[in-house]
Image (cartoon, grey):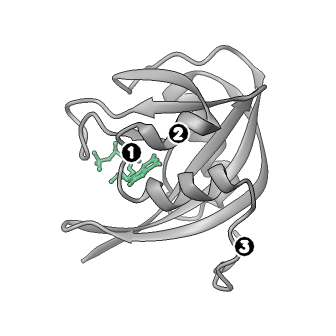
Amino acid sequence: MKHVRVTAAVLRRGEYILLARRSEQQSRPLLWEFPGGKVEDGEDDRSCLSRELQEELGIEARIGEKLGLFPFSYPDISIELAVYEAEIIRGEPHPREHHELAWVTVDDLLSFRLAEADIPAAESVARGVPEQTGNEGEER
Ligand SMILES: Nc1nc2c([nH]c(=O)n2[C@H]2C[C@H](O)[C@@H](COP(=O)(O)OP(=O)(O)OP(=O)(O)O)O2)c(=O)[nH]1
């Protein structure tokens, strides 16, 4: 099965976190996710995430602490979701590729219909502690 590493941002503004809803044309259509995307060859997580946030939302972001690594297997693809804290340095996010965006409180995170791989990540954000899996993989 195809295996990819995917980066995702917990982009905070005050008490809110940005969720993005996948478009009808993408895989996992209309499900909510943390913005980000697939790591390309030779790219590290943080440069991947900066690039994806620029491309998808039109913002410049500072990528902070790694919150955890969340592996998940879909029927078609297995992913390793690397989740990082992030904050906006410049620009206002607009959905260039997503169906829509929403700023949500931590308490509301789990009431959105999330991509399955994001559920453990969102639970970890809701608990407010970085995930300690003991299997963080290579820090890239
Ligand atoms: N960006 C992002 N992708 C996620 C998350 N959770 C999750 O399961 N995914 C999945 C959806 C995709 O299969 C893959 C990321 O792909 P992408 O966002 O770079 O890709 P894409 O729209 O070009 O993907 P695709 O339609 O070709 O699958 O990881 C998440 O929180 N953020």
Give the tally of numbered discs. Answer: 3
Please indicate whether residue 121 sits to the left or right of residue 23 in the image.
right
Q: Could you say which disc has been placed on residue 109 in the image?
A: 2
Q: Is mark 1 within 8 Å of ligand 1?
A: yes
N-term mark: 3 or 2: 2
Q: For the residue carrying disc 3, how many other residues have a C-alpha within 10 Å: few (<14), some (14-19), or many (20+)?
A: few
**Residue 48 placed where, x, y %?**
60, 50
Report the amino acid beneath label 2.
Answer: Leu
Nearer the observer: mark 3 or 1; the answer is 1
Report the amino acid beneath label 1.
Answer: Leu
Q: Which residue in the structure is indicated by mark 1?
A: 114
**What kind of element bears circle 3?**
loop
Please indicate whether residue 97 sits to the left or right of residue 15 in the image.
left
At horizontal 73% and vertical 47% (from top left) the residue drawn is 85
Q: Can the viewer see residue 58?
A: yes
Q: Is residue 45 above or below residue 71?
A: above
**How much space separates mark 3 and mark 1, taking CA atoms?**
26 Å
Q: Which residue in the structure is indicated by mark 3?
A: 139
